[in-house]
Image: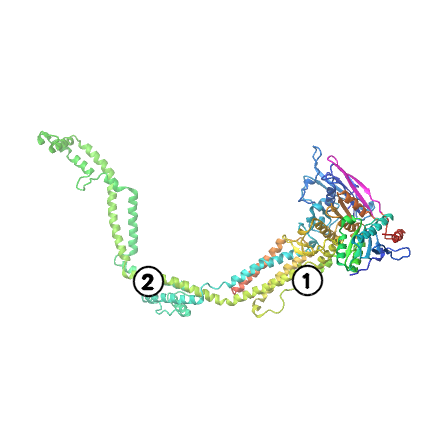
Amino acid sequence: MNNHLPQEFLLADNDNKPVKITGNYWKAEEIYLNNICIAVKLKLTKINDELENIKEALYSLLMSIVQTSLDHDLLRPVAGVISIDNLGDDSLQKDIKKWGSDQDWHRGAFILFIEHDEDKVKERIKGLMKLEVEHFQQEEFESDTTQTRQNSIPLLFSGAPGNNIAEFWKALEAIERKLDIIIRTHVQESDKHLPYDPIKTKNSIKDWESEIISMSDKIAEGEYSG
Amino acid sequence: MGDESRTIGSINRVRSISFSNFRGFKSKNHKVNTNADLVLISGPNGYGKSSFLEGLLLVLTGWHDESRNTTKDLIALPANENGVESFKIEAEVSDKTNADKNSTGNISIDWLKDEPTKLDRSKVKGLPESLIGGDCELEARLCGFFQDRVDILFDQAGKGYTLRDVFDPLAKWIKNVQNYFKQEFSQNLNAKKTKIKEKQPEEDLQTVSDKLKREWNGFAEIYRELATKKDSFPKTPPDGTEERNIAVFARQVLESAGILTGTNDYNLIKKLKQTIIKELNDLIYKARLKVSGTTGDLQEIEKNLKEIKKQINEIKGKYPDLSNKLSLFKAEDPDDPDMAAVFRVLLRNAESWSQIDTAGFFGDKSELSGDGRLKRVLEEFKAVLPDEAGKCLHAIDLFLGPLKKAEKELIRHGKVKRELEKKRSKAKSSDKIKELEKLRKDIELSIDPLQDAWQAKQDWNDWLSKQKHRENALSFLEEIEKLRKKFFVFADNLTKPSEEMRKTLEKIANLLINQFSLVEGFSPLNFIQDSDKNDRYIYRIKTKDNRGTAHFSTGQRSQAAVAFLTAQNLMISSKLSHRIIILDDVTTSYDLSNLTREALLWRHMAYGMEGNQARQVFISSHHEDLTNHLLDLLVPPEGCSMRLLKFDGWSPENGPEINSYNVTPTREAQKDTGVRSAFAEALKELKW
């Protein structure tokens, strides 16, 4: 997967260096800005403290960014993305994972995503900045079917007939040829986008079946001459 | 809105929309400016927000949810006694997001209550051609989310086309044929095989052979006696062990009677029976003729008997109740005179009796004595006139004459009849005839079971002779079975949904749903290819922990529905006739966390996408706090636009009161116009 972060949205200072800001407990390693949102890649710098202090500092950091964006008339949703794979502490990881859905805490002022590793963080930020939905053509989906159809339509029986069926090989050929015609007719009608008539299909298959039954009766009675 | 109707290639923007007498939009021309990338609709419940979006969906697709409202119910209820007869929705649309007047057109739906109630795309004037095909329901559920009918967005709850029908319309007939091959055809093929196998006769061959031998030997014993009476018949029937010998002998018998036989042995014994019985009948007839030679021709006797019986019946018919009528005039004692005799005596003797001196003859006898009583009778007879007695006699003769004649005829005919019957009986009964008749009966009794046994054996012979053919037929059907299986695989390959399509849809939907980072176990969603009871191809949505949509919470259901809707909508961009997304009351089921995340998705669609992927998004919300929050989250950047439609009131006379506001964009952030670096510098100063 291409996990290159969208450099065109990376916020840089006057010296064209990516903005990194550090404060209590948290470091904003990278900040991205576009017309959709502001995304902040966050790293916890100090883990040996009260959880509430860590949480409060995060709130303070993200709200400061929200306020600063407002001050600059850049009102957009602010999303923080945290990687927890370097935290080590399982219980801390578990607690932090709950903050994203703690609406009493964030009150919808910002969004928090918790990711397990660096790649996921990159992927998340990339998705936040740009929603890339693949373009495709109908033909891409049809290709399997068309290929199968083209390969399958030729006679379904293959190889030389065994001795036991040699006497009625022509009958089998006739039966198969008729099925082949039914299939080809349907394929052609479908390709021409003609309306599908299920009764017609059923009748043609029923006729085909009647021919098989009649043929088997003739063979069983010794009346089939080939 | 212009009067001219101009059709455009596809709709990227609904610039304005107007409603007349549609649901809560009473009276005419509620025209609303909607010319923005994103339109946020707010207002309390019941002010017409959903009707607005339903009307928008209807004019864009020709579809409305008939399970909720009949078409007639879409007409606004009148506020006064003047009934409303129609509704109309009209929208000014353009094929560009930022279009001038020259690239706009109008679409409209105008429905009169007397028109057919079924609405569809054809009812909408000016609508660009849809490449989706089928029904308009699919197009509607690919663009319209309504909180109170979320389930319809999932394939299994929808009624019409699915995405698969759009991309792979061939599959339907193949699926039908495949189903036929799987069920009905397979059953019929097996039934045929069973029938061919079951053609073996019920009784086993040994039993049938033993029975034939037994019945033949029984018959042969009787036949030997017959052969003594018919010189031309071959004399020595073979032992019944060899069927061939029986056939040879039977043919000899038939030939001796002048019957030519064909090669078919099946009816040989039947013919034998017919021939023998015929020969026996001839023998019996001749024997009878021989006997009747002493008594006259039997046929003549039968003829005369028939004639005499006829005459007797004619007399009886002409004189019904003959003997009773005659008995009225007969004396009880045959020695006594009957009524005619009495009058005849009176006629003959009346004159003589009148001259008898009864007093001198009998003296003065008491009337109590015998002589006295006779004297009295004679005196009475003396009073009788001979003419009167003659007249009575004449009358009696007239009545009784024909009856007596008929009685005599009957007596005479009866006598003749009895004689003839005696002759006939004699002609018929003789020892030789009886013997032949017994023989015929014995033959009949023995040859019927022989005939059955013979034909059973022939059935076996026939079955054995066709064994090879049956084996061929079964092999033929086995080959057909192979063909069936091959076709099944072939059809399976044809009907197998494009895995690429499923993967793409699943991927896009999960990309979208990933914006939420929902409860663990929910994401990623799996789209399972399936078909429903109506044989439609559908995607069933399952969570990572294998829960179907029925097990989703309300919020999860909404999130999955929006993701499914949006993913399909984005996938099918090239085929859509419009690029509008409608989300009614979508905020209701979201908590603040997810609402904020979802807002990002809507910003992407309205402000972040290009070309035919860009969407005009309509969102309604009735909760004021959430609406205000959403407003902050959705404020457009410079170069994009947003309108806020506030539904501020509703009255029975005029419908909703709508105020439309342009939301001022914030600064553009992608180009460095100075604001980016200023913002960056400001962030560097942050302390927390």
Q: Is residue A156 above or below residue B514?
A: below
Element under disc 1: helix
Depth check: give the residue in front, B532 or B621.
B621
Q: Disc 2 marks which residue?
A: B439
User: In this picture, is B568 found above or below B233?
Assistant: above
Please name the amino acid that badge 1 sits on: Thr
Residue span colored magenta: B638-665
Task: Specify the farthest residue to the front.
Answer: A49
Say if residue B638 shows up in the picture.
no
Label 1 or label 2, whichever lies nearer to me, is 1
The answer to whether residue B497 is seen in the rendering is: yes
Which residue shows up at 25% across the image and 58% down it?
A: B294
Residue B643 in magenta stretch? yes
Q: Is residue B264 above or below residue A15?
A: below
Q: Is the image coloured rainbow, by chain, by secondary structure, or in one colour?
A: rainbow
Name the residue nearer the viewer: B318 or B363.
B363
Residue found at the far right of this picture: A15
Query: x%, y% of residue B379?
Result: 14, 30
Element type where label 2 sits in the image: helix
Per the rendering, the mark at residue B267 is: none
Where is residue B228? Give x, y as percent.
32, 67
- Tell me the crowding category of disc 1: few under 14, some 14 to 19, or many 20 or more residues within 10 angstroms, Cα based: some
Residue type, mark 2 in image: Leu
Label disc, if present, on residue A148 of the rendered structure: 1
Q: Quarter holding the N terminus of chain B?
A: top right
Give me the C-alpha separation between circle 1 and circle 2: 79 Å
